[in-house]
Image: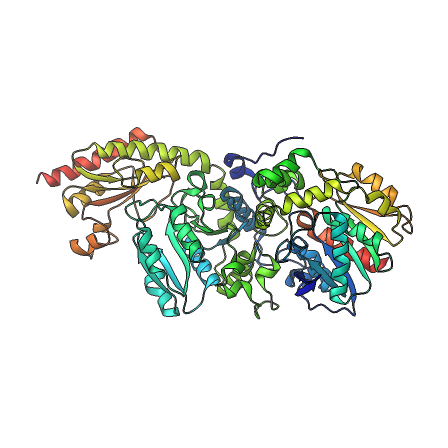
Amino acid sequence: MELSVNDTPAYVYTGGRPFDRRQAVVVLVHGAGHDHSVWNYQARQLAHHGFSVLAPDLPGHGRSQGAPLPTIEALADWIESLLDAAGVVHAALAGHSMGSLVALQAAAQAPARITKLILLGSVAPMPVAPPLLEAAARTRDSAHAMINQWSYTPASQLGASPVPGVSLTGLNLRLMERQRDGVLANDLAACNAYQGGLEAAGRIRVPCAMLCGERDQMTPRKAVKPLQEALANVPGGARMIVIKGAGHAMMAEAPDAVGDAMRGFLTTT
Amino acid sequence: MTQPRTFGPETLALHAGQSPDPAFGARAAPIYFTTSYVFPDADHAAALFNLERPGHVYTRISNPTNAMLEERIAALEGGIGAIAVASGQAALHLAITTLMGAGGHIVASHALYGGSHNLLAYTLPRFGITTTFVDPRNPDAWRAAVRPETRLFFGESLGNPGLDVLDIPAIAGIAHAHRVPLLVDATLVTPCLQRPLALGADLVLHSATKFLGGHGVAVGGLLVDGGRFDWEASGLFPTLTEPYDGFHGMDFAEESPVAAFLLRARREGLRDFGACLSPMNAFQILQGMETLPLRMRAHVANARAVAEHLAAHPLVAHVAWPGLASHPDHALAARLLPDGAGSVLSFELQGGRAAGRAFIEGLRVFSHLANVGDAKSLVIHPASTTHFRMSAQDLAAAGIGEGTVRLSVGLESVDDLIEDLNRGLYAASRVVQG
């Protein structure tokens, strides 16, 4: 569906079911250079099991208009505006990679509105390797190749896929190619510049789950620890869920395990 | 930080799409000979039908062995995915019916495999889909043939029977200027000699029966999606960009802007037209693909030796193989097919039908049959077999001479092939000399 967020048209995928704000709402925030379609299976699973899903294309991404927003803080503000546009008071937030920083910041900024938080493939701070930053700014194809190399496991690199007949790495390359010039560079710079993650984490007082791919090279398990420890005020502590066999692109590589973990966390805590 | 690298075609041909079997550790591709799949519970079943989870429901729609084949060809072609079907003809039909219905129009090269020509010229018009055939070498002809209802451009990497080289970048550019995709039949080249998606094509099909299998034991087809065509921006493809009542009201482009075509082709085309591939055939084609890069190199080397030998023979009026400088598309082939122009060639024998017949009957190693792309060398003389009822004038109109012979050069010792051809040429010479 299309919403007007800050007077700019924004596209929001709802998981194949009409949006109903009377149900529990979950917002799914995609990562750098992506759009809503990275959440296909998880969005459909949640939408068909009692949740209303808002999986937006962030400004300048996919079908959403406007310029890409330059900071994680601005993107977090935009998520709040999205909730306003959808007439939603309370929502759970989930974000992947760059989207996890946006979700974290938004939850810290609007504690009264965010009921639960799920961080997938998340570390804070999230420094981006200089060669990738430079490639994103100058030679996009090379940046896409780097992201594919580091986001997918060797099995996916060799074409194996949980989705019959689909090449996960091929699909991801084309998805990144579709984004407008400058979007990926903007997003990676925003990740690299964001320094408020650990401070924001300390302000989170709602249940929080962290999903980490067992074979993630972008945000590996050991690198997740400082953020997990900074989520000290989460009731019972942040729950770490390791997605077996998956890399950073865990929603694509392990759609069932990620969907089940998200749904389980949202349903039971 | 390591630099990114991708696997080479030899590695992909052996491994892509197949990890060691998690149940028993089998290294070879298991054949999942099953029609259907047990659902762990009712919720899981509903989730599969609903696309909340990926997985297999019924082998007409997907099968684990077929998926290995699909993922292997997708990796080799640089596509986002593929669909395995019962034959190359089924792949062409699936592509067309996913993109258009009655009223749709196709612009196609006139240099097509006869089966494809039959489908486009005679069968599809009965269902309201028409085709304008054009000279593949003439960009203006492609442009001039476009109508408001055109939804697809279609050609072969190497055309039939003259082995015309399709200028994929140029024709794709014209297609895209008219907001339609280019589908390329790459059967004769395989991804080892050309990757049409990298040259600008949007969809690729293969008769996997030919070089991909290579053994001549299994019929199958593959349709690969490059994922670059923007169906929404085009605005000409409501099958992909509007809710489909036949599948949960799904708007495929909304679901996946990149994979909308594959989604619709599998969820509607395979489901309803049902031209699925047997898992046994998928397994056999996978076995062939493991050696594809090696075989294609050897095919091309033998084809070059055979083409050069024939071109130098006094009884041969003309050899059509783009690897020869005498071919009108030689320069284009050097650009688009730098690793070789395949191993199918045709030549014109002096002496007409009688000489052609004598040539064929004089051969011992080449098998006389109607196929190409086998590891074994194959030969056919259209004027005395597939087109024997046609007059010389009608043959000429189809681009075939009375002495035209088509070879599919196989992997035998090249000296044996040349000796065999000499034997046939000697038999033909006796007819010519009377």
Position of residue B314 relative to residue A47, above or below, is: above
Of residues A55 and B416, the one nearer the viewer is A55
Q: Position of residue A134 (x, y in %)?
A: 63, 36
Q: Residue at x 82, y 50 (%)?
A: A209
- B54 to the left or right of B82: right
Position of residue B239 relative to residue A185, above or below, is: below
Res. A246 visible in picture: no
Question: Hey, which residue is sitting farthest left in the picture?
Answer: B434
Q: Residue at x 22, y 34 (%)?
A: B311
* Quadrant of the frame with the N terminus of chain B: top right
Q: Residue at x 80, y 50 (%)?
A: A105
- B106 to the left or right of A96: left
Question: Hey, which residue is sitting farthest top in the picture?
Answer: B415
Question: Hey, which residue is sitting farthest front in the picture?
Answer: A7
Snapshot quadrant of residue A138: top right
* Quadrant of the frame with the C terminus of chain B: top left
Q: How many marks?
A: 0
- A35 to the left or right of B211: right
Of residues B167 and B386, the one nearer the viewer is B167
Res. A254 visible in picture: yes
- B413 to the left or right of B31: left
Q: Position of residue A176 (x, y in %)?
A: 60, 47
Q: Position of residue B170 (x, y in %)?
A: 38, 47
Give the colour scheme shown.
rainbow
Of residues A165 and B286, the one nearer the viewer is A165
Q: Position of residue A164 (x, y in %)?
A: 59, 52
Snapshot quadrant of residue B314: top left
